C-alpha cells in the first residue's frame, strides 16, 4: 500500500558496544498502529468506529459545514429563514386565517455514473444539482440537502476529496446547505466506486402551484437550452469518442433560473427537468399526466452541432438523451415571448426556445412535425437506447 | 451540420414532392432495401407526404432482422461460456433467441460488451490474454469490410484468443429472391447506398435488365429518399429499366476496390439462411479456409441447439414486403419492443420497430397513413 511506503519509520537503534547499558531501553520502539492518513477507502471507514469518525471530522464536516459541531449530531435541525416564515404568517393574519403550516417540498434521488469525473462535472456536482433542480422546477426554494454515500473499498481517497469539494462548490452555487449525511463502505467488487443519494428540502411560497394538470390547449412549451449535452458528454468519455471541441455536461443548479422565471411570469403552469429519458420522457409525462396533446416543432429544438453529429454517428435520438441543467416549461401563449426573453437573459437560459404547443387533439401523445413537414409520434424510450449497427 | 442540413432542407423537400406529384399518373409499389432508409422514411413522415399512388414497402435490409434464429441461439450459448468475452453491436443485445436474449445472458453473469468497431475487440483480446473474445459479425456488405479487417489484423498480429461468429448477408441475391417470388408486388427498388459505397452497383445491372425493373442507388437523408423515389417513379412512368445512382456523392460504379479486395481475402461466398425468408443460395459470407481458425462456430461446439421460432410473428412476410408491420395481429399488442416476438421489432432499423417507435399504432384513425 502506498501509505506504508510513505510512512516515516523510527530511527534504527544503534548499539554502541562500548556503552552497553545495564537495562534495555525501549523508548525508541513503536507499536505498528493503524495508519491515520489512508490513500484509499477501507472497509473500516464504514465501521462506525474510529476511521468513520476521522472521515467525518476530517473530510465531510470541513467539506460541507461552517459549524463543526453541527455535523456531529444524528440529525440536522433546520430553521426556515425568518423573513419567509414571517411573511407567510403576516399574509395569513391579513386574510384572517389561522396560521397554516408552511409548505415544504421534499425530494430524493440517487446518483450512479461512470466515469465519476467527466467533462463539465462529476458525480458530486450531479448529486447536488439533481436534487436542487427537482425542488426548483416544482417552484420551491431549495434550502438544505442530505447526502448518503456508499463507497467501494479501495476507492482512492483523493477521488473522494475531489467529490466532496465539488459538492461544496455546487452547494455554494445553488445557495443550499448540506446539513446531514451518512457513509457506508462495501467490499471491493460489490459496488461501483461511489454511489450517492441526496435528499432535499425546499420551501413552497404561498399560493404557488405548478402541476402537469394545469396545462391547457394553446399553451406554449419552452426548453431552457440545448438538449442531449450531458448524455453525449458522458458517452463520449466512456466510449472514447472525440470531437473538435470539448463537449461538456450541462449539469447546473436551476434555482436561479426558475426564480427569475416565476418572478417575471407567475402564470407558468408547469416545469420539469428532462434528465434520464431526455426530452421525450418529460413531454410524454406532460401529455399523459394532463390528458392533452403535445405538438413539437423539430426545427425549433436547440441541439448542439456536436451532439447532433454524435447522435447521427451512434444512431441515437437526441430527444432521448439525458440533460442535467435544462428545464421544460409550459406557459399561456400570451406570456410565452416574455418568458422566453427572461430565460434568454439568464446565463442558464441563453439558448432557450419555444419548441411546441399544447393541443386539444391526439390526447396523451407527443407528435413532432419533422423538418421536412412529415409527422411522427415521439414515444417513450423502450429499455436502453442502443446504438445501431450501421 | 454540414453534409446533413442541406439534405434536410424543407424548401428543397417541397420542390421534390411537387416533382414527384407531377410525374405520378398511376399506382406504383417501390421497395426501399435498407432498414436505415425505412428509419428515415418513418422518422420524417416521408411516406405520408408522398402522393397516395406511391406505396413504399420495406425491404429485408436490416441486419438484426435477418440473422437466423439458430445463429442467435449459438451466440447466446457462446456468450454464456465463462471464459468468453462476447462483443456485439448494441442493437443485437435485445434480439430474442429461442427464449432469451443477450441482455438475459448478461444479467445471468455473461461478460457481454457493446463495441462500436470490431477493431475494439482486438484491444480487449490483448488486454485479456486468458479469455476468448468473440465478436458477433453481423450485417450486410456495409459492415463486412471492418469485420474482415479485424480478422485480417488478428491474423497478422498473432492474436489467437479472438474469434468471430459470422452472419454476413448480401443484398443482390435477396433482391433476386424477392423479384423471383410469384407473390412479389415490387415494381422498383431504392438500393442501399452504403452497401453500394463498398460494392459499387455493377451487380445490380443484370437484375434490372433481367427483371425489367428500375433500381435507384439511394442515400439516407430525407432529400436522398425523395430524390430516389422521384427518379424511380420517373423511370417507371417512362417504362425504363436500369440502374441509376442518386447517391453519387458517396457511391462510385466500381465501389471501393480496397475494401472488396479485403473481403475477397478474408471471406468466401456461401449459402445463407435469412430469418423469416429461408436459405438463399450464395447470399452471404463465411470465413475463407485460411481464416477458418477464427471461426467461433468451429471453436465452440454449438451446432446441436433446438430452435423455436415464434408461430405468431410475420417478420418473413414483412421482410419480403408482403405484409406491413401494423397489419400483423401481434403488432403493438403481443409484440412490442419490450417483448419482441421477432427481430423486425428489435432494431430501430427493423420495419416493425420503426412503425412502433414512431407511434404508427397509436395514430388516430383520421391521421392514419394508409390510404391504400
Image: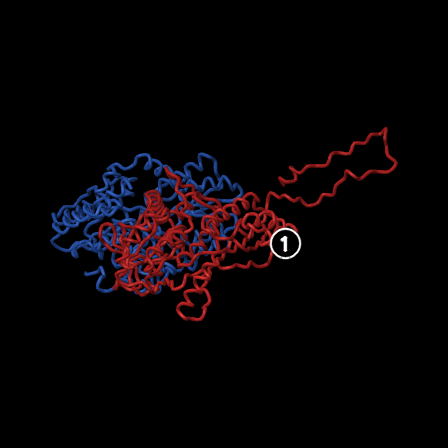
On screen, residue B143 above or below B359? above
Residue B70 lies in what quarter of the image?
A: bottom left
Residue B319's spot in the image, x, y percent? Answer: 29, 55
* Residue found at the far right of this picture: A22
Asked whether the viewer can see residue B146, the reply is yes
Number of numbered discs overlaid on the protein picture: 1
Residue B244 lies in what quarter of the image?
A: top left
Chain letter for mark 1 = A
Give the residue displayed 51% in from the left and 59% down from the top: A79
> Can you identify the residue that label 1 sits on?
A47
* Relative depth, front residue between B107 and B134: B107
Residue A270's spot in the image, x, y percent? Answer: 35, 60
Residue A40 lies in what quarter of the image?
A: top right
* Relative depth, front residue between A71 and A52: A71
Asked whether the viewer can see residue A322, the reply is no
Mark 1: few, some, or many residues within 10 Å (few <14, many ≥20)? some
Which quadrant is the C terminus of chain B positioned in?
A: bottom left
Q: Colour of chain B?
A: blue
Residue B130's spot in the image, x, y percent? Answer: 54, 43
Q: Colour of chain A?
A: red
Residue B24's spot in the image, x, y percent? Answer: 13, 52
What is the secondary structure assignment of the residue under circle 1? loop
Amino acid at each position: 500500500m502506498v501509505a506504508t511506503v510513505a510512512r516515516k519509520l523510527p530511527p534504527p537503534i544503534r548499539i554502541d558496544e562500548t556503552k552497553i547499558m545495564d537495562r534495555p531501553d525501549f523508548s525508541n520502539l513503536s507499536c505498528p498502529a493503524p495508519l491515520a492518513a489512508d490513500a484509499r477507502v477501507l472497509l473500516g471507514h464504514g465501521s462506525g468506529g474510529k476511521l468513520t469518525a476521522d472521515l467525518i471530522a476530517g473530510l465531510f464536516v470541513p467539506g460541507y459545514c461552517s459549524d463543526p459541531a453541527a455535523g456531529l449530531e444524528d440529525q440536522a435541525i433546520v430553521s426556515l429563514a425568518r423573513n419567509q416564515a414571517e411573511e407567510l404568517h403576516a399574509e395569513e393574519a391579513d386574510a384572517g386565517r389561522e396560521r397554516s403550516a408552511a409548505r415544504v417540498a421534499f425530494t430524493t434521488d440517487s446518483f450512479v455514473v461512470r466515469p465519476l469525473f467527466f467533462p463539465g462535472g462529476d458525480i458530486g456536482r450531479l448529486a447536488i444539482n439533481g436534487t436542487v433542480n427537482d425542488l426548483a422546477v416544482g417552484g420551491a426554494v431549495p434550502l438544505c440537502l442530505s447526502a448518503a454515500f456508499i463507497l467501494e473499498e479501495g476507492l482512492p481517497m483523493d477521488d473522494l476529496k475531489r467529490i466532496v469539494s465539488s459538492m461544496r462548490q455546487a452547494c455554494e452555487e445553488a445557495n443550499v446547505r448540506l446539513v446531514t449525511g451518512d457513509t457506508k463502505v462495501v467490499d471491493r467488487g460489490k459496488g461501483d466506486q461511489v454511489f450517492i443519494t441526496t435528499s432535499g428540502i425546499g420551501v413552497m411560497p404561498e399560493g404557488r402551484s405548478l402541476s402537469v394538470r394545469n396545462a391547457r390547449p394553446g399553451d406554449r412549451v419552452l426548453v431552457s437550452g440545448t438538449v442531449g449535452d450531458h448524455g453525449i458528454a458522458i458517452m463520449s468519455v466512456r466510449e472514447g469518442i472525440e470531437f473538435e471541441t470539448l463537449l461538456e455536461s450541462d449539469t447546473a443548479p436551476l434555482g436561479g433560473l426558475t426564480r427569475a422565471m416565476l418572478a417575471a411570469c407567475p402564470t407558468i403552469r408547469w416545469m420539469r427537468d428532462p434528465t434520464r429519458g431526455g426530452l421525450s420522457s418529460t413531454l410524454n409525462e406532460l401529455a399523459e399526466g394532463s390528458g392533452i396533446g403535445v405538438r413539437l416543432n423539430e426545427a425549433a429544438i436547440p441541439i448542439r452541432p456536436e451532439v447532433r453529429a454524435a447522435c447521427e454517428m451512434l444512431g441515437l435520438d437526441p430527444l432521448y438523451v439525458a440533460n442535467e441543467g435544462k428545464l421544460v416549461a409550459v406557459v399561456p401563449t400570451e406570456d410565452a415571448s416574455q418568458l422566453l426573453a427572461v430565460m434568454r437573459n439568464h446565463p442558464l437560459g441563453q439558448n432557450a426556445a419555444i419548441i411546441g404547443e399544447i393541443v386539444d387533439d391526439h390526447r396523451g401523445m407527443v407528435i413532432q412535425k419533422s423538418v421536412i413537414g412529415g409527422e411522427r409520434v415521439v414515444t417513450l424510450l423502450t429499455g436502453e437506447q442502443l446504438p445501431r449497427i450501421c | 451540420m454540414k453534409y446533413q442540413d442541406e439534405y434536410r432542407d424543407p424548401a428543397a423537400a417541397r420542390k421534390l414532392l411537387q416533382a414527384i406529384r407531377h410525374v405520378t399518373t398511376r399506382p406504383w409499389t417501390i421497395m426501399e432495401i435498407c432498414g436505415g432508409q425505412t428509419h428515415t422514411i418513418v422518422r420524417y413522415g416521408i411516406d405520408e407526404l408522398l402522393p397516395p399512388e406511391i406505396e413504399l414497402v420495406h425491404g429485408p435490409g436490416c441486419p438484426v432482422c435477418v440473422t437466423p434464429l439458430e445463429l442467435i441461439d449459438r451466440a447466446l450459448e457462446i456468450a454464456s461460456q465463462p471464459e468468453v468475452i462476447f462483443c456485439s453491436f448494441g442493437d443485437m443485445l435485445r434480439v430474442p433467441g429461442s427464449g432469451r436474449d443477450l441482455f438475459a445472458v448478461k444479467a445471468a453473469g455473461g461478460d457481454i460488451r457493446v463495441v462500436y468497431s470490431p477493431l475494439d475487440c482486438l484491444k480487449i483480446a490483448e488486454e485479456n490474454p486468458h479469455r476468448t473474445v468473440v465478436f458477433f459479425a453481423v450485417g450486410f456488405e456495409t459492415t463486412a469490410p471492418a469485420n474482415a479487417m479485424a480478422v485480417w489484423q488478428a491474423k497478422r498480429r498473432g492474436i489467437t484468443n479472438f474469434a468471430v461468429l459470422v452472419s454476413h448477408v448480401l443484398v443482390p441475391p435477396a433482391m433476386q429472391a424477392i423479384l423471383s417470388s410469384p407473390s412479389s408486388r415490387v415494381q422498383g427498388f431504392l438500393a442501399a447506398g452504403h452497401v453500394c459505397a463498398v460494392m459499387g452497383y455493377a451487380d445490380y445491372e443484370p437484375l434490372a435488365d433481367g427483371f425489367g425493373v428500375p433500381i435507384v442507388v439511394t442515400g439516407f437523408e430525407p432529400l436522398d429518399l425523395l430524390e430516389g423515389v422521384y427518379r424511380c417513379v420517373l423511370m417507371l412512368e417512362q417504362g425504363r429499366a436500369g440502374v441509376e445512382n442518386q447517391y453519387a456523392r458517396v457511391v462510385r460504379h466500381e465501389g471501393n476496390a480496397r475494401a472488396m479486395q479485403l473481403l475477397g481475402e478474408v471471406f468466401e461466398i456461401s449459402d445463407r439462411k435469412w430469418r423469416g425468408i429461408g436459405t438463399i443460395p450464395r447470399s452471404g459470407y463465411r470465413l475463407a479456409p485460411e481464416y477458418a481458425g477464427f471461426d467461433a462456430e468451429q471453436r465452440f461446439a454449438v451446432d446441436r441447439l433446438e430452435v423455436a421460432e415464434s408461430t405468431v410473428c410475420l417478420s418473413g412476410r414483412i421482410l419480403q414486403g408482403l405484409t406491413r408491420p401494423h397489419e400483423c395481429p401481434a403488432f403493438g399488442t403481443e409484440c412490442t419492443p419490450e417483448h419482441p416476438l421477432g427481430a423486425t421489432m428489435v432494431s430501430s432499423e427493423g420495419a416493425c420497430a420503426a412503425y412502433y417507435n414512431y407511434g404508427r399504432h397509436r395514430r388516430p384513425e383520421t391521421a392514419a397513413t394508409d390510404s391504400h
